[in-house]
Amino acid sequence: MKIYPIASDSLGVRSLSVFIESRVNVFIDPSAALGPYRYGLPPKPPEIQALQKYKKEIRELANKADIFVISHYHYDHYDPDEDFYEGKVVYAKHWKDKINYSQKKRAYAFHEKFADKCELHYVDGKKYEIEGVKIKFSKPFPHGNERTRLGFVIMTTVDDGKTRVLHASDVEGPIVEEAAEYIITENPDIAIIDGPATYFLGYRFSQEDLKRSIKNLVKIAENVPKVILDHHLLRDLKYRDRLEEVYELDNILTFAEFNKEPINMLEAHRKDL
């Protein structure tokens, strides 16, 4: 198995997109987007250029994908304007159960557009095996804490018998202890996790949420050999200081670091841009 972290906030765009190459090729959350406003400012030219770059790369890799996974219906995780889902297998978060109103509308539109054009499966809590590759989906977990209005996401585990990788999607921490326990219980070699949204600290993200996230991430990092932590967390210029206890461990990487590229937090630097 080869794991390719494609696009993320450490690479300059909002995304947690991963391409897994094995006996079947699995493309998880094949999309990217930009924050419409940050510091009261719209995206700047370097961000737009980065988005164009990664959108092109996603389209090229989509041709090689056998299976697409949509963990939830936010535009930085799926793009309804793309047509590369056609003729492919699509494993998606359920469009009716455990879903908030805005995502439900988007999921319905996706269903109407693609249900007859691809092999579309709603996979919350289900397991599959294709050519000896096991693909398992979690039950829905909150997109944030238990009171979130952002809906729910599903996690994906891909196991080819040699490597086991878990994509935790937008658990924002994880804040919720049950989500952290699920990640650990899956026993992955690599866990790809959306870190806490500390750039909202004191506004939509509380100190209590931060304490829970730190405790959960330390426990995960003590049990999982390699943790790729990115997305919401990398919108905060002080992310390493906020998670000092986590980064005392030596197995935490961003997408950029995993790819041996410079960290490029464009949205966090938008005022400077």
Image (tube, rainbow, N blue to C red):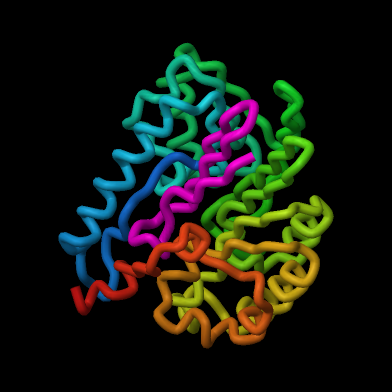
Q: Who is closer to the viewer here, 70 or 208?
A: 70
Q: Residue at x 67, y 56 (%)?
A: 191
> As displayed, is residue 208 above or below residue 72?
below
Q: Who is closer to the viewer here, 234 or 171?
A: 234
Which residues make up the magenta segment?
A: 1-28
In x, y percent, where is residue 6? 44, 48
Q: Residue at x 34, y 40 (%)?
A: 57
**Quadrant of the image containing the C terminus:** bottom left
The reply to whether the magenta stretch includes residue 184 is no
**Quadrant of the image containing the N terminus:** top right
- Is residue 51 rendered to the left or right of residue 95? left
In x, y percent, where is residue 45? 16, 60
Q: Residue at x 27, y 59 (%)?
A: 36
In x, y percent, where is residue 164? 73, 46
- Is residue 124 rendered to the left or right of residue 40? right
**Residue 147 is at least partly visible in this image:** no
